[in-house]
Each structure stands twice: as structure tokens, then as C-alpha cells.
Image: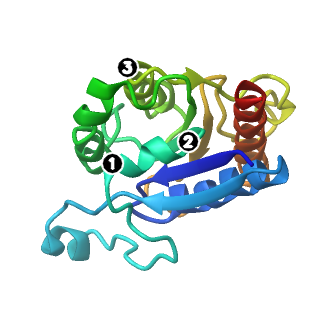
Amino acid sequence: MTKVLVLYYSSYGHIERMADAVAEGARGAGAQVDIRRVAETAPPDVVAAAHFKTDSSHPVIESADALAGYDAIIVGAPTRFGRMPSQMASFWDTTGGLWAKGALIGKVGGAFTSTASQHGGQETTLFSLITNLLHHGLTIVGLDYGFQGQMGVDEVVGGSPYGATTISGGGGERQPSAAELDGARYQGRRIAEVAAKLAA
């Protein structure tokens, strides 16, 4: 059975909801899926002052070495000025040993993100996540146009050929829409399908 890791960082719960949808899609393709989050690195007073969401049913990933046990790794994080946040970057900075051994070469990867506004850096943030995966030798699967939910213009909707996205609003008031969650499920399913084919 194909093993998929959904690895995420979420400040306010938007990416956490997207991670659940990505995992749902991958499970729908018959994969065994684990959802893990990276550790919070912001000081406790900053977390409290910013009202970060601190309760989650998903455990923190214990070690970067765990990545080697998966056939596919799907990474989600919100934007910080058009790139991944320091919490996720700090995690990937611990993966040098895996890189040196080529431990992730040939696996399948993908990314998803959220921004406050429609033009808040969704694609550049996805590329900042994908860049790490490419350096590790993963084959990237995005949100292809088989998912037509990203094509409409009659409502505000995230989505990019580079990965599933959501728009949170300036105060985090907007939760992922049905179309955005469907995009996350679609991408999760596609990644699991590709990983299964490569492992066959």
C-alpha cells in the first residue's frame, strides 16, 4: 500500500483544514496516510498575542528521518511575505542528512498554501515549498486542470496549477471554500495515484 505523508504548518487552522482534505483525497486513492505538523517555533508570547490556533489532533513530526518512510510527501504552509513561514523552513533545514544520502530521491511530492488575499503570494509560496522537494529529488505533482474548480471567475477561489490554495481574508475570517477543499482532495488523490504507479 502506498504511504503518504501530509506535513503542514498552520497558524490559524486554514492549512490544517486543507491538510485534512488533501489526506482525504489520498485515502480515496487507496493510500495509507499520516498527517503531521511541524513544531511551532514562535515564542509563546507571540503565539498568544497573535491568537494562533494551538490545539490540533495531529501530532508534531518527531524527526526529519521519518520522511524516508513514505512514498509521497505533500507539504502545506501559509505564506509569509510570498514564501514559506520560518516554522516550515526550520524543519526543512534539518533534512541535510537525508539529502546527503539521497533518501528522498524518486518519491512524489506536492504543496498547498493559503494567503490572506487573492494576490498575496500563493504561487511564490508554493514554489518556495516545491524548491525544497526538488532539491531532495521528488517528482512534483501539482493541481492540474483536470480540476475544473479553479477555472471559474464567478466567485473568489484559490487554486493554481502548482498546488491547491485557499484565501483566508485579512483577519482570517474566511475558511476554505467547498471548491478549495475539493481542489485539495483532488491533488491528494493525484499524488497518491502517481506514487502508486511509480512504486508498481
Task: Return the residue nearer the eye: 168 or 113.
Answer: 113
Q: Residue at x 17, y 74 (%)?
A: 44
Counting residues from the N terminus, which is met first, the one under dot 2 or under dot 1?
Answer: 1
Q: Which residue is tagged 3?
A: 135
Specify the quadrant of the image occupied by residue 196. Answer: top right
| Amino acid type indicated by mark 3 | His
Task: Return the residue nearer the eye: 34 or 158.
Answer: 34
Task: Point out residue 187 in the picture as x, y percentages from the top left corner.
Answer: 72, 38
| Amino acid type indicated by mark 1 | Ala
Q: Residues within 10 Å of mark 2 (few under 14, many from 20)?
A: many
| Amino acid type indicated by mark 2 | Ile
Q: Residue at x 60, y 46 (%)?
A: 166
Q: CA distance from mark 3 to mark 2?
A: 15 Å
Task: Point out residue 84 in the picture as x, y percentages from the top left corner.
Answer: 35, 38
Q: Which residue is tagged 2?
A: 74
Q: Residue at x 48, y 30 (%)?
A: 126
Task: Return the residue nearer the eye: 104 or 25.
Answer: 104
